[in-house]
Image (tube, rainbow, N blue to C red):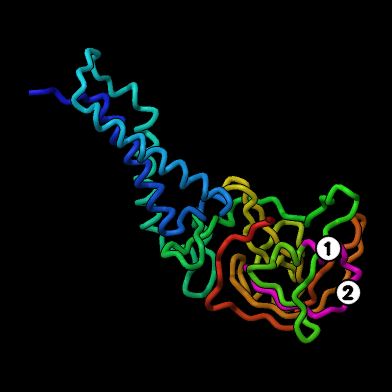
Amino acid sequence: MKKINAEVVAKILILLGFSIFYLKIIVSNEILTYVHPRIIPFAIFGMISMFIITLFLISDVFYNNRKKFKIKNHFIFIFPLIMILFMQSSSANSATKGIDTNGKLNESSSTNSSSNNSNNSLPSLNSTYELYSGKSESDGQGQVDKIQLNIVNNIIEVNINNFVSSLDEILGNPKKYEGKEIEISGFVYRDKDLKENQFIIARFMMVCCAADLQVAGIECSSGDSDSYDNGTWVKIKGKIKINTSEDGIDPVIAVENIEKDPTPDTSYVYPF
C-alpha cells in the first residue's frame, strides 16, 4: 500500500484553506471590508491560481518523500489560517453590534462592511483617524480636474456615490458655493479641535485597504448638535458658509435641519 505524502497533503490543505477563504469573502462582498474594489480582480486571480496549484499537487499525494514531515516548516502558512478562522468567528459574533437600534456607531466595533452585507459593523471611533482635507493633486497641467456637483432644484445633493468628489469640489472652491443649500448624510464625528456646537458630517474613506482609513467629511455647525452623539448616522440640510481663520478659508454647513438616518448606507467611500 502506498504511503500518503504528508508534505503534499499539508500544502493542499493550506492552499484549499486560503482559496475557500477568498471565495467566501468575494462571494459575500465581505472583501470590501478589507480592500478597495479595484483590488478584487487581483484577489480573484490569486484564488484561482492557488486552486490550480492544488489540482497539480493532487497527483503527488502518494509520491514517496524520504524527508520526514515537519509541521513547523509550514507554520508560517498555518498560523494565518488559524487567525482567519478566529477573525471569521469574531466577525460573526459582532455582526449586529456595529450600529445600534438608535442608528449609532458602537464605539467598541472594530470591523466594517458594505451596506448590503450581513455584517453591518464599522471601525471604532475611539481610534484617531486622519481627516481628509480634499483633493489637491493636479492633472499634470496645473489644472485641477473639474467636478460637476449633483444640483437639484438649487440644492447640492451629496450621496454615497459622489461623496468624495463633492467634498473635493466644495473644499477646493468654498467661495463659489457660499450660500448654497446642501443635503448630505453621514455619521456625526467630533474631534478635540471642534467646539460644542460643531461636528463633522462624515464617512469612512478607503484609499487602498482598511489600514489607511480616513474620515472624510465637512464641518457643520448646529445648535441642536448636542442631541446627537458621536457616531450617530444623520441626514442634514443647511447652507454653506465661509469660515476664515489663520489656516485659510473653509466651508462650514450651517445646519437648518437634522434628523437621524434610520437606514444608513454604511459603505466606505473611495477617492477614485
Is residue 143 positioned above or below 160 on the image? Answer: above
Which of the two labelled residues, at mark 1 and mark 2, occupies the earlier sequence position? Answer: 1
Circle 1 residues within 10 Å: few <14, some 14–19, many ≥20: few
Q: Residue 178 carries which label?
A: 2
Query: Viewed as shown, does residue 1 lie left or right of 180?
Result: left
Magenta stretch, residue numbers: 168-187
* Count of numbered marks: 2
Q: Where does the image place residue 200, in percent across and percent down from the top left?
A: 71, 65
Residue in the image at 56% along x and 70% along y: 265
Q: What residue type is labelled 1?
A: Lys
Is residue 33 positioned above or below 18 on the image? Answer: below
Q: Between residue 102 and residue 91, name the one nearer to us.
A: 91
Query: Viewed as shown, does residue 25 lie left or right of 211?
Result: left
Query: In whole angstroms, how far apart are the C-alphas of marks 1 and 2?
Result: 18 Å
Does 56 appear in magenta? no
Check the picture and name the quadrant holding the C terminus.
bottom right
- Tell which residue pokes out farthest to the bottom in this image: 153
Q: Where does the image place residue 123, in percent across and percent down from the top left?
A: 54, 56
Check the picture and name the quadrant holding the N terminus.
top left
Residue in the image at 41% along x and 39% along y: 49
Q: Between residue 79 and residue 54, name the one nearer to us.
A: 54
Q: For the residues carrying marks 1 and 2, which lies nearer the camera in this image?
A: 1
Element at label 2: loop
Q: Where does the image place residue 209, in percent across and percent down from the top left?
A: 58, 47
Q: Where does the image place residue 112, in percent across and percent down from the top left?
A: 51, 57
Does 171 appear in magenta? yes
Q: Between residue 268 and residue 5, name the one nearer to us.
A: 5
Query: Viewed as shown, does residue 138 lie left or right of 157?
Result: right
The quadrant holding residue 28 is: bottom left
Q: Which mark is residue 146?
A: 1
Residue in the image at 38% along x and 31% along y: 77
Is residue 126 positioned above or below 97 on the image? Answer: above
